[in-house]
Every structure is written in C-alpha cells, then in structure tokens.
Image (tube, helix red, strand yellow):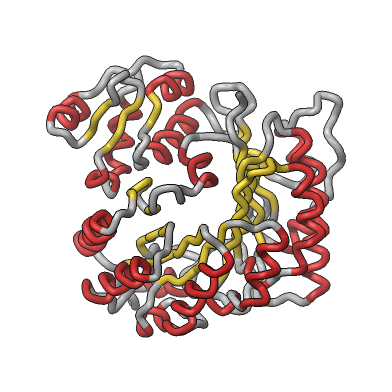
Amino acid sequence: MESPVALYIHIPFCHALCHYCDFSKTANFDSTHVHTYFERIKHHLELILPGLKAPVSSVFFGGGTPGLFAKEYRPIFQVLRRLIADDAEVSLEANPRNCSHENLAVWGDLGFNRLSIGIQTFDEAGLKFLTRDHTTYDSEASIRNSRKYFKNVNVDLIYGWNGQTESSWERDLSVVGELGVPHLSLYNLTYEPRTPIGRAHHRGRLAGADEVSLLAYYERARQVLGATGYLHEEVSNWSQPGFSCRHNWVYWSGGTFVGIGAGAHGFIDDGTATGFRYAFSKDLRAFLRAPAGVPLENSGLVHSAFFSQMGAEIDADRDLDSALTEYVGSSLRTAKGASLQRMAAISLRTFRPRASLRRGLAEGMLEMDDERTYLRLKPAEWFRENAWAVEVILSFV
C-alpha cells in the first residue's frame, strides 16, 4: 500500500497584511490577478497529480487568505475531484470575517470538509497588536457559524504577543473549549526579519517574550487542554478524539507533499534516501512569469527536472545529513515519534545513543515503544525539541 500524499495549494491574496506574517502574500490585486493565478494553479494540478504514485489523501488551501474566495474555486475543484481520493481531507484557511453563511454553504458544496480559522486570540488588545481586522465578537460568531456547516474545524491561536497575560491566555484556551472546537493549532509568536514587527524587534523597539514565558504558556496549554480531553499530537497541535489532521501527519512523518502556488514548497519521496525538495518563487509576478510547464515524460512519474521546467527551484544542496535533520526535526516533536528504521535508512548509519540520550531514556524524558522501533520525546520535552534533535542526529554514526 502506497503512503498517503498531501497537496498544498497556496493562495497569496489578502484583504490586509498582518504585521507578523512572512508568508507569500499581497493585498494589491484585482479580479484579473485572481483569475490568472487560479488558471495557473489549475494547470499545475493537471500536470502534476496524474504523475504521483499514490492518490492524494489530503488537500490544504493555505495563504494568504484563501477564505476571501468561494465560488471562484469551482474550476479548481473540477480538476481536484478527478485526481484525489474520494475520502480526502480537504481543508480551507479562513479569517473570521470570511465565515458568512453564504461562504460556508458554498465551501461545503464545493468539497471542503475541514475549516481552519485564524482567530489568533480572543483578546482585543492582542488582536490590535497582531493587526488583525476582526473583533472578539467576529471570532466567536465565526466558530459558531462554522460548526453548523463543518464538523471538522481548527482554530489557530498565537501566544507570546506583547501585553499578553496568563489570564488572557487561559481565556483563549477556555473559549475554544466552550465552543467545542475539535482541533487547535497553538503557535508561539516569531519575529520574522522581513515583517514590520520583526524589523521593530531587530531594532530594539519591540521586546519579544522570553523563553521562560513561552514555556509557561506552553505548559499552561498542556494542563488546560489535557484536562478537557484534547490529545496532544505535536508540539503545536491538539485534537479531540477522531479529529486528528491527516494533512499534518504527512509532513510530520516525512511523506510526499506537493506544494503548488507562489511560495509553495514540496517534497517528493522518489525512492532515494534523500528524496528531493523544490520551492516556487514567493513573488507572485515571478511565479506567473515562469513557464507554465508541459506534461510529464513517458516515465509517468514526477521528478526534479519536471518541477524545474515549471519555474520551481530544486534544493541542490540536499544530502543525507539535511534529509536526516529534516525528518528528525519534524517527527521527534510528535506523539508518534521518530522511526529508528527510517532514520537509519536516510542516514545510512547505525544508531548508537550518546550519553545524553541514554540519560534521557533513563530519566523518562524520552522513551522507545515496546518493539524499539520508534524514539519518542515526552510532551514536556517537545518545547526543547531542537536540542534533543541534535543529540539524536549525532547518535547516528
């Protein structure tokens, strides 16, 4: 049985630009830009998906603000329905003000079956700091409305913003629980260099939360959500039983994911130890100026040259070390953990635990399953995953 394949479609259009976001995005667009971009997305889908070795099990429309559009997605879904699994998980990112009854009905009719709402916080001061264009009322209303149309709903929350308090964070956590949100993504605020708040932080005009505070917010989330029945799947992701995000697990387990659109990245497991990675330009105009691409060669399988001729940049520096680092970094901070067999196959080396790992296993910070096939960190240690990942990587010699 082939491993599942995930598809990511990037929609870069936004009504306004949030000051913390570093994704490919633009607020300078019109209907012509949208039509041209969607035509290119549709063309790439028709070229790429037939060459995959397994059906697409999940699709995620991210952004940008994909929720700005509804009926505009119909031509894309005419292609998707033919090329993805019948039971595929199909997610759409939306902002609270996108979640009108009209849009929710159209999204469901098109084939979306999972909604991810960018709430970020229910605190008005926090929304202002994060330059969000919605209110707490909008946030709560969007969740209530969405739950009428979608069983599977995720909410994004951010912690570590300036002015946040323990009580405001606890309120954020309690509100999503009270509203019955089945999946949560909790991210600590990062100050990306190319963003307004990142530049202010770099110049010393804006202080970020320290590690002690961030760890305290993380631990409080573990306590509150664990007590209310949420399962901690990954350092930033929580779900109620039955609502795990299928798309996320492809990333975390080192599976094939196809990225389409400006700024989209992809990884193809082509049977080699490293596979190959590619990325499309973050610049919308550069993405549209690139060659549209031609059908696959007779081999019928996607390959690096195929993506290159569509304007994607191939990661030519990818080697065994970078492949191992990538896999360990994504899998070690999950409830499943990192496969020892997979790490050995990627690195072509033998696992000989360093003293620090042996100590961590003895003290219960790490564990192996009964078959000794997976190495897992305890959730309390996921927040320090980077340091543990280094020790794991150095233990393959």
Q: Residue furthest front?
A: 148
Front residue (pair 156, 35): 156
Front residue (pair 239, 336): 239
The percent coordinates of residue 350 (x first, y second) are: 36, 15
The percent coordinates of residue 328 (x first, y second) are: 40, 34
Residue sitting at x 34%, y 70%: 178
Q: Is residue 19 visible?
A: yes
The percent coordinates of residue 94 (x first, y second) are: 57, 68
Q: Quadrant of the N terminus?
A: top right
Quadrant for residue 204, please give it. Answer: bottom left
Q: Quadrant of the C terminus?
A: top left
Front residue (pair 207, 26): 26
Front residue (pair 192, 92): 92
Drawn side of residue 193 relative to residue 352, left or right: right
Residue sitting at x 35%, y 21%: 373
Q: Is residue 191 visible?
A: no
Q: In the picture shown, does residue 373 fall above or below 244?
A: above
Q: In the picture shown, does residue 183 fall above or below 7?
A: below
The percent coordinates of residue 164 (x first, y second) are: 28, 75
